[in-house]
Amino acid sequence: MDKNHEGHRERLRKKFVQHGFISFEEHEVLELLLFYSIPRKNTNEIAHNLIYKFGDLNKVFDADMEMLQEVDGVNESSANLIKMIPQICKIYFKHYDFIPSFKFKDNALNFAIHQYIGETNEVLKAVYLDKDCNYISCEDICTMDNDSVVILNIKKIIERAEKYNSGDIILMHNHPDGNCLPSDSDIYNTLKAIKILKSIGITLIDHIVVSKNNGISMFSNGYLKDINSTYYD
């Protein structure tokens, strides 16, 4: 690595130390990040190519490992480093106890979107609440690959509800393909779950479907007409 480029790396590091990312272009964020997996190569061009291929910084972080490595200069270590960032963000925010009041549908929707930061697999989660709609826990129920639909694991949902003595549940899952509209099977399985849970005294308040930075409440959008709930009144 020549001295000019070595000096550029040091200037970019100092810029971050002094100001954070506030004055960085998106490609500069990637350029600096890649310093730590590509120690002796100009990462500026690689960063530009990543932005060009995927469109913006968020889409780079959301890209599959295999697709990242299609960009010239991105090896497995670099792809791993890129994929770590959204997962680290999720852990970081988790430790700030970002738990909203679940008496408001917008808060529940925002919470759901937050849970799927950087998630590329389809994952069903259940949020367990007490009788006053206070948060108890959010648990993964099942994980499917990108070509499968989420199949409700009612037994596991009930086991967790009994463990937490929870009478109210919100289900949520994601569509990694970018479409957050519920599928026919999503609607069928949710209505089926409502009836089964109701028979043992558990209320399924809502089922939220998330995709990227968007989400849909199945209850608020009329997909769960059979629910008899005043939760969002």
Image: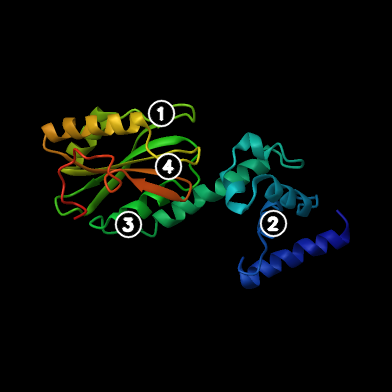
- Asked if the residue at tag 1 contacts the one at tag 2, i.e. Cβ–Cβ closer than 8 Å, the answer is no
Q: Secondary structure at mark 4?
A: loop
Q: Secondary structure at mark 2?
A: helix
Q: Which mark is residue 65?
A: none
Q: Earlier in the sequence, mark 1 or mark 4?
A: 1
> Looking at the image, which residue is at 24% across and 28% down?
155
* Residue placed under numbered mark 2 in the picture: 27
Q: Earlier in the sequence, mark 2 or mark 1?
A: 2
* Residue placed under numbered mark 3 in the picture: 106
**Circle 4: residue type:** Cys
The residues bearing labels 1 and 3 have C-alpha atoms spaced at a distance of: 25 Å
* Residue placed under numbered mark 1 in the picture: 149
- Asked if the residue at tag 3 contacts the one at tag 2, i.e. Cβ–Cβ closer than 8 Å, the answer is no
* Residue placed under numbered mark 4 in the picture: 180
> Looking at the image, which residue is at 76% across and 61% down?
9
Task: Judge the density around disc 3: few (<14), some (14-19), many (≥20) Cα neighbours within 10 Å.
Answer: some
Residue 22's place in the image compared with 199, above or below, is: below
Q: Which mark lies nearer to you, 2 or 3?
A: 3
The residues bearing labels 2 and 3 have C-alpha atoms spaced at a distance of: 33 Å
The residues bearing labels 2 and 1 have C-alpha atoms spaced at a distance of: 35 Å
Residue 118's place in the image compared with 195, above or below, is: below
- Side of 19 where 220 appears, left or right: left
Q: Earlier in the sequence, mark 2 or mark 3?
A: 2
Observer able to see residue 166: no
The residues bearing labels 1 and 4 have C-alpha atoms spaced at a distance of: 13 Å
Q: Secondary structure at mark 1?
A: loop
